[in-house]
Every structure is written in structure tokens, then in C-alpha cells.
Image: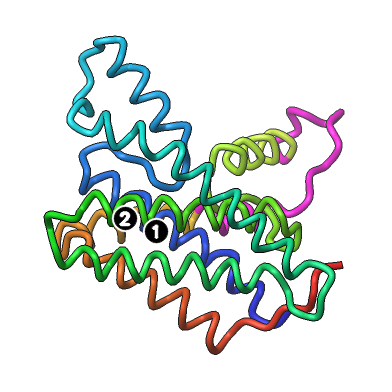
Amino acid sequence: MRGLPVLRPLLAFVVGFVDTAAFVHFGGLFVAHVTGNIVLLGATLAGSAVHHGENALLQLITFPVFFAAASVAAALASRFKGQAADFTVPLLWAAASLIALATLVAWWPTRAAASALLLVMAMATLNAAHRLDTRLGPPFTVMTGNITALAIAAAQALGLARSLPRSAGAGNVALLALFFASGAVAGALGDARFGLLAMGFPAVLLIGHLSFGLRMEPAA
């Protein structure tokens, strides 16, 4: 599993970067987690005064695209599991390739929606990879559960929750949250400077690690 300790925070950075850059670029579109889009779409359909109405159609499309991409990722994983090849690496390559393709499509501003959907597919693939491979550890795609775990660990450290079982791995969770936040800042800055072309940066980071830094044994 050489390269796995670096992979986890790297994936958190990549997802934070991609989700934030897309959110800023499209004025309120989440590509990494569907929950936000469902909330925004519900508010828009209810006629609430939110500023995401111009992306209501794109928000609606993201759900079936995300669902289909995650299903395809599971089907791809099933072709590798139990064989000599490991299914996680192909899924990570697929996600990296989709991010790179979204960057290339972004050269044509009129195809921005296509870039967004490719990013949705990439993030769905990463979500599926995390769900299927327990070796990837705590969630790196959404931070709600991680922040909750850190809050519980803080309460335990302060002696406010002594009766609860001590949770392990708080340091790893904090590291993921830190890298996700760093990716979010970098994504916002990248979009402000380069637009969707900034997606090339996380694509290169992930492809580089897959090419030179990651070695994983087959899943048990």
C-alpha cells in the first residue's frame, strides 16, 4: 500500500478544489456531493429567494448523472475485485481522466455545462471508490462526518464525554479536513484566475500520484 498515506489527504485536497471551483464558477453547483444540489433545487422549485435559480436545470441533471456514474464505477469495480488487479486504482484513474477531460472541454466556454457534468462523474467515481474500499479510511469527499468526529474527540479530550468510547484516528480526520479546506481555498483562487481550466491542477496532482507514488495490494 505504498503511497496510501499520501493518497488520502491528496484526494481530500482534490475534492475540495474541484467542488469549490465548480461552485464558484457556476454560482452554486455542487459536483462532489448531491445533497447540496438537492437542497438548492428544492429551494428554487419552492420559489425561495435563492441566487441559484439560473442553474436549476443543471442541478436537476446532476442527480441522475451522479447516480449513473456511481453505478458504472461499481460495475467496473466488480470486474476487478477478486482478481490480481485492484479495483481502486482503476477507479482513481477513471476519476483523474474525467477531471482532465473536463479541463480540456473547458477550453470551449460554450461547453461549460459539459465540463460540469464530467466533474460530477469524476466525483461520483471517487465517492464510489471510498464506499467500496475501506482502506481509504475516513470520508474525503464530504467533511460533515469528519468535523462531527473531531467535535466528539474534542469533548472527550476536555473530559466532557468520559462515558463514550474513545474514538481513534482523530489526527487522520483532522488532516483530511485541513487538506479539504486547503483545496477549497485553492479551488476558489484557481477559478478566479483561470476559470474551469484550473481543474488541470488537481488532475495533474492525482495523475502524478497514480503514476509514481501509489502501490496498492489487492483488496481482501
Image location of residue 19, percent across then percent down: 37, 50
Residue depicted at x 30% and y 51%: 116
Question: Is-magenta flag for residue 167?
Answer: yes
Question: Is-magenta flag for residue 210?
Answer: no
Circle 1 residue:
182
Circle 2 residue:
185
Amino acid type for the residue under numbered disc 1: Ser
Q: Secondary structure at mark 1?
A: helix
Q: How is the image coloured?
A: rainbow
- Residue 219 versus residue 114 in the image, above or below: below
Residue depicted at x 34% and y 25%: 40
Q: Secondary structure at mark 2?
A: helix
Mark 1 and mark 2 in contact? Answer it, CB < 8 Å.
Answer: yes
Magenta range: 157-177
Amino acid type for the residue under numbered disc 2: Val
Image location of residue 68, percent across then percent down: 52, 46
